[in-house]
Image (cartoon, helix red, strand yellow):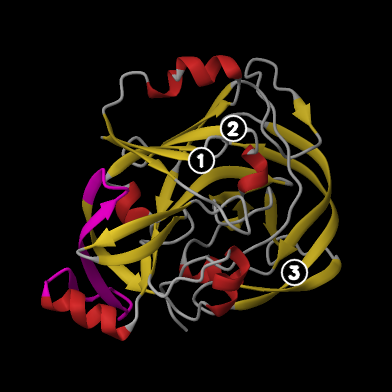
Amino acid sequence: MKKTFTLLTFLLVYTISNAQNKTEPIIENKFQLTGDTISFPLTIINAFPFISVEVNGTKGKLMFDTGAQGALDINNNIFSQSGRSTGNGNVGSGQKFKRYIIDSVKDIRLANGLHFKDLKQVSSANFEFLQDQVTPDFLGFIGFDFFKGYLFKLDYVKRKITFYKNSSKRELSKDFLFGEKILATLNFETRKLPNHPMIKVKIGDVDVLASFDTGGSYGALEFTDKTIEKLKKRKYFIDYGKDGYGEPLLVLNNVRMNGQLTTNFIGIHQHGESINFRKAIGITEENYLTIANRFLAQYRTVWDYEHKKIYVMAY
């Protein structure tokens, strides 16, 4: 079994909610953000961002995965509640699992004090393989529906994520950009799913479709043999040895984003089987790149889904 993997085909539908007052925490019964500006400390493990949490008295971590559409998904390997089967799921590296809906989760407390009780109809699956390969206290996922209606700033240097509620006032003030050195403003599209921002990039004269995903591990590519051969001749595609698990690493140089930013990706992987993922989010292009940790560790980013923009800023 591969030790390196992405969560690209982890396309779940959840239900979530949230709260804000830190002096007297409001208890919510829907797992979604509330409030105007909310921050969480992050822990980065094996390239994945996590938010600390306590679920029904058990302390652990939820992965912040923009590639997951639902708000919450619980690891039922830790919480052995019975539930109604809803089908199967899989991740980008091929691991498969059964998906369930459990009737309720009694209590969730996030690291910044947000508190939720009596959540109903919560998605779950057995994520034992993520406990084995990423962190033993893996309690599940936080996904797109948790922060629907918000934009967020992601900072892997300060290990922090801050959510800003969308409003007409904020659209004018852009307070989330105060003090930032903006290197690029990337206009993106979405296709079949709203949580997968996609942009067109160029490597030399080769066109590539790229998508952003915090659950995409270090990043990965899927190119045709002809493209790889062409890029290798220009040293834009370089074999970079292997990682600690024996998986090949690659360097992708001279990646130009929307004509504004040119960057390199050092130490990314090749995608595993991607047919289901491509179909799910609407990828038809032959050459595809997942933008994840290697990029997010180089640049601070703001993800504005409402206006379909990602701001790239200097650390």
Q: Which residue is mark 2?
A: 150
User: Which residue is nearer to you in this view: 100 or 291?
Assistant: 291
Find the distance from the CA under tag 2 to the CA under tag 3. 27 Å
Mark before the other along the chain sequence, 1 or 2: 2
Asked if the stretch drawn in magenta spans residue 66, the answer is: no
Instruction: Residue 52: give its label.
Output: none
Q: Is residue 238 left or right of 179 when viewed as pictured?
A: left
Q: Quadrant of residue 203?
A: bottom left
Amino acid at circle 3: Arg
Q: What range of the chain is rendered magenta?
A: 234-262
Query: What's the residue type where badge 1 is placed?
Result: Lys
Q: Which residue is mark 1?
A: 308
Q: Residue at x 30, y 50 (%)?
A: 257
Comparing labels 1 and 2, the label whose residue is closer to the camera: 1
The amino acid pointed to by label 2 is Tyr
Residue 240 visible at all:
no
Q: Position of residue 218 (x, y in %)?
A: 36, 61
**Which of the 4 quarters of the picture holds residue 229?**
bottom left
The residue lying at 69 percent from left, 52 percent from top is 70
Q: In this orientation, which residue lies closer to the viewer: 58 or 86?
A: 86
Q: Distance from label 1 to label 3 (Cα)?
A: 31 Å
Q: Earlier in the sequence, mark 2 or mark 3?
A: 3
Identify residue for label 3: 99
Query: Residue shown at 66%/32% (left/top)?
Result: 33
The answer to whether 220 appears left or right of 127 in the picture is left
Question: Helix, strand, or loop for circle 2?
Answer: strand
The answer to whether 57 is drawn above or below residue 162 in the figure is below
Query: Spatial distance from mark 1 to mark 2, Cα to Cα?
Result: 12 Å
- Callouts 2 and 3 close, C-beta under 8 Å: no
* Above-or-below relation of 245 to 312: below
